[in-house]
Image (cartoon, helix red, strand yellow):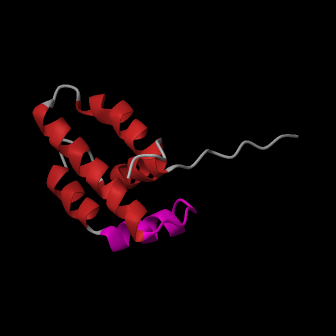
């Protein structure tokens, strides 16, 4: 019997946090408010994702999420097009 645990990263926290609050296009303002609330982001990460993050990580997630919202606003026909960029930004440990 083998167990496969989902790999959790700052990107998966961002992705799941945004999914929790809504759709990139239809709920953009709700998502913007949620992404600016770093305390809620830290709580979500710990209690929903089982990932302890600090304020710096929450700020990083917030910045990338807000950039994703800006991308989605500019590209409403393909709002998920920023996913690879967001993932690279959050999983590259040398990026502040």
82 horizontally vs 52: left or right: left
The residue positioned 43% from the left and 50% from the top of the image is 16
User: Residue 35: x and y, percent?
Assistant: 27, 60
> Magenta segment range?
38-54
Q: Quadrant of residue 61?
A: bottom left
From the viewer's perspective, is residue 66 above or below residue 81? below
Q: Going by the picture, which residue comes out furthest to the left?
A: 74
14 horizontally vs 77: left or right: right
61, 1: nearer the viewer = 61
The residue positioned 30% from the left and 57% from the top of the image is 62
The residue positioned 11% from the left and 33% from the top of the image is 74
67, 76: nearer the viewer = 67
1, 95: nearer the viewer = 95
From the viewer's perspective, is residue 96 above or below residue 40? above
Q: Going by the picture, which residue comes out furthest to the front?
A: 94
From the viewer's perspective, is residue 31 above or below residue 44? above
User: Residue 95: x and y, percent?
Assistant: 40, 47
- Residue 8 magenta: no
Q: Going by the picture, which residue comes out furthest to the right?
A: 1
Q: Quadrant of residue 40?
A: bottom left
From the viewer's perspective, is residue 87 above or below residue 63? above
Q: Quadrant of residue 70?
A: top left
The residue positioned 45% from the left and 53% from the top of the image is 13
1 horizontally vs 9: left or right: right
User: Residue 27: x and y, percent?
Assistant: 19, 50
> Which quarter of the figure is the N terminus placed in?
top right
């Amino acid at each position: 019997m083998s167990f496969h645990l989902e790999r959790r990263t700052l990107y998966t926290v961002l992705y799941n946090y945004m999914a929790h609050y809504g759709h990139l296009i239809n709920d953009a303002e709700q998502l913007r408010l949620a992404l600016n609330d770093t305390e809620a982001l830290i709580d979500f990460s710990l209690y929903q994702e089982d990932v302890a993050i600090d304020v710096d990580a929450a700020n990083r997630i917030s910045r990338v999420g807000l950039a994703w919202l800006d991308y989605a606003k500019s590209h409403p026909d393909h709002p998920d097009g920023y996913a690879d960029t967001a993932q690279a930004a959050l999983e590259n440990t040398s990026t502040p």
